[in-house]
Image (cartoon, rainbow, N blue to C red):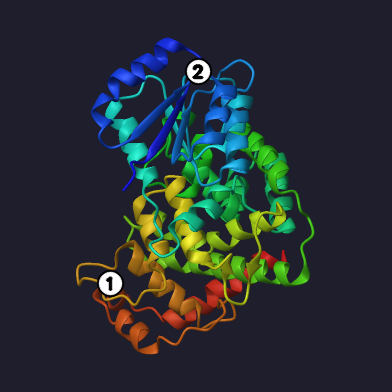
Amino acid sequence: MTKPKVLFVDDEPRILDGLRRSLRGKRSDWEMSFAPGGEPALEMLAGTSYDVVVSDMRMPGIDGAELLTRVSTQYPQVARVVLSGHTEPEAAIRVAIAGHRFLTKPTETETLTGVVDQLIVKTSRAHGNQARRIAGAARALPTLPAQVAEVDAALSAQEDAGRLARAVALDTALTAKLLQLSNSAFFGARPKNAGIAAVVTAMGLPTIQALVAAAGEEWVSTTWEPEVEAYLRMSWRHSVATACLAETVASPAHRPYAHAAALLQDVGALTALAGVAGGVHSVDLTKRECAGVPFQEVGVELMHLWGLPAPVVTAIAERDTPHEPAEAGLGVSGALRVAHLLIQGTDARELPDEASEEELKALLAHPQMAARSADWAAEARLASERASEWLAA
């Protein structure tokens, strides 16, 4: 087997020399190249198939944001990492759209090697390279026009922080991006294991405004083909209803992750549709596939690239797997599975229907569920009704 290839890009020779010295211990694991700027990096990428590119931000000529944007278009299979010091907010947002992971200078060698090693791994066993190409091409995800309008209105109503948090929590694409950025010190300290409201507060209004504006330029499409819009509406209603119910099902410690996993469970379809909007991929909404790769595998690969918390990524990957949770608790994956199956019995179900009555019966008998005297079918219908109301608003 050939070694994974990693390209490091920085216009300062001393930085590249420092990387060469500090990464000597990885020479047996990686094949490393070093480019003294954006233009040389593009020349090297044209001649060699790399797995990961690690770039500085502030470089003359082709800066890091432009380099990574070109990589995302021309070489989407290459994972993109920013390793940079503080930079201007506008440039930071540009690279937030183009990058997968973000590290600040100086960073510990173990941190850098850990991130690169993670990104070398592809999550799909059956469609590894293809799933990586589809996921790697996505810089921002599509959403419904009504959601865009609500986020814009919430941003305008600056005195109502709660409204903005609610609008973001109902926007799958924006939630995914904010959770990606919230896991990086590059964008400042962020709360760990926190709900989307806390992330919105920590990120701050100016950052969110800039992110929404920059992301909008990536997927501007206020009208969709009827079948695509119908799918988006179905997917959104199912995800939001499941997220609403998952917060009730999950234990307090797992609640933020369960909510995020439920809201992002169909992010693979959004990733595929982002490629359709850009003329990159074709999708089969009936088979739920993009270029032969199941939507779920695409979504898991993107969440892995973006570095979302492992419990969220695992729960999305295991959503359609029958569960037999430990008696001690459902965990994040179990909470998502229960909520998903319950919502499948409502008007917010996701097609195709899933026949798992025996499994659902067993899950509802789990101590975590049985300890509460709740009518879970009624709770699911209520969550479905709420999602329908939000969609119609």
Q: Which residue in the protein does label 1 denote?
A: 368
Taking 199 as reference, is 265 above or below it?
below
Q: Position of residue 232 (x, y in %)?
A: 66, 66
Amino acid type, residue under disc 2 in the picture: Pro
Could you tell whether 334 is left or right of 65 in the image? left
Q: Quadrant of residue 22?
A: top left
Amino acid type, residue under disc 1 in the picture: Gln
Q: Which residue in the protein does label 2 denote?
A: 36
Q: Quadrant of residue 58?
A: top right
Could you tell whether 372 is left or right of 95 in the image? left
Q: Which residue is found at the position 56% from the left and 42% from the top?
A: 75
Point out the image quarter for the C terminus.
bottom right
Q: Which residue is found at the position 62% from the left and 52% from the top?
A: 141
Q: Position of residue 2 (x, y in %)?
A: 34, 44
Q: Quadrant of residue 390?
A: bottom right
Residues at circles 1 and 2 in contact by the CB criterion of under 8 Å: no
Looking at the image, tell me whether mark 1 or mark 2 is earlier in sequence order.
2
